[in-house]
Amino acid sequence: MTKMNISKLVTEAVDTMQGSALQKGLMLTKGLMLTVDSRAASLLVYGDFDRLKDVVTRLIDNAIKFTIEGAIKVGITGEEDSACVYISDTGIGIPPDIKDRVFEPLEQIYKVGHKEVPQRTGLGLAICKAVIQHHEGKIWFESEPGRGSTFYFTLPQVRTR
C-alpha cells in the first residue's frame, strides 16, 4: 500500500465516469451533473490506488444507473482520524426491504421507476465492501425511496507528526 492524496483519487474516478457517461449519452439524456466537493483536498491515506479508484467508480456508476434526473455529488470530508468519501444522488433510492442485503453478493435492484435496468452480476457493492474493509475502512449508506441515496466510506488518514 502506498501513501496517496484521496482528493486526487476521487477526482480521477469522477473524470473517468464523466467521460463514460458522455460516451453513453447518459449526461444528456438523464440531465445529470457530476460535481466534486473537496474541502479536504490535502488528506492522505494509505491504500491501493487502483482498487480504491475502482470503488469510487463503481459507486458513481450505480448512482448514474439509478438516477433518472437530478444530480450526483461526490465529496470528501476530513474526520478526526479518517477521510470520508461520499457519493450522493437524487435517484430512486433503495427499498427498505433490501437495505440489509445491499452489500451481499448477487443482490440487485432490477427496476428504475418502471423501466428495467441492464442486469449485471450483482457483485459491485460486495466488491466495494471487501476493498474498503481490506483497507481498514467502513462503508455504509443512507437512502430514502424516491429521493435518492448517499454512499459513504472512510479510510484511516496517514498520521503526520
Image (cartoon, helix red, strand yellow):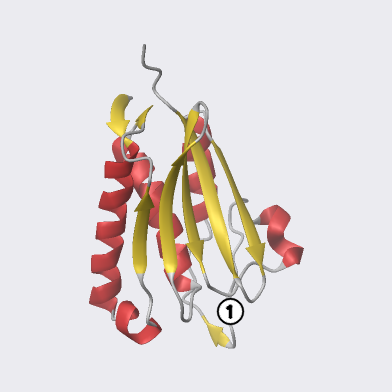
Residue 14 location, x and y as percent?
31, 57
Label 1 crowd (10 A; few <14 / some 14-19 / many >=20): few
Furthest toward the right, the residue is 97
Residue at x-position 70% and y-position 58%: 99
Per the image, the residue denoted by label 1 is 111
17 versus 80 height, above or below: below
- Quadrant of the drawing holding the C terminus: top left
Query: 106 or 23, which is in the foreground?
Result: 23
- Quadrant of the drawing holding the N terminus: top left
Residue at x-position 25% and y-position 58%: 15
Query: 8 or 78, which is in the foreground?
Result: 78
Query: 28 or 116, which is in the foreground?
Result: 28
| Image quadrant in which you'd find residue 71 | bottom left
Q: Secondary structure at mark 1?
A: strand
Query: 107 or 160, which is in the foreground?
Result: 160
Residue at x-position 50% and y-position 61%: 88
Residue 74 location, x and y as percent?
41, 56
Q: Is residue 128 left or right of 43 when viewed as pictured?
A: right
Residue 108 location, x and y as percent?
59, 65
| Image quadrant in which you'd find residue 7 | top left
Residue 146 location, x and y as percent?
64, 76
110 versus 97 height, above or below: below
158 versus 83 height, above or below: above
Q: Is residue 101 left or right of 2 when viewed as pictured?
A: right
Residue at x-position 29% and y-position 31%: 4
88 versus 130 height, above or below: below
Residue type, label 1: Lys
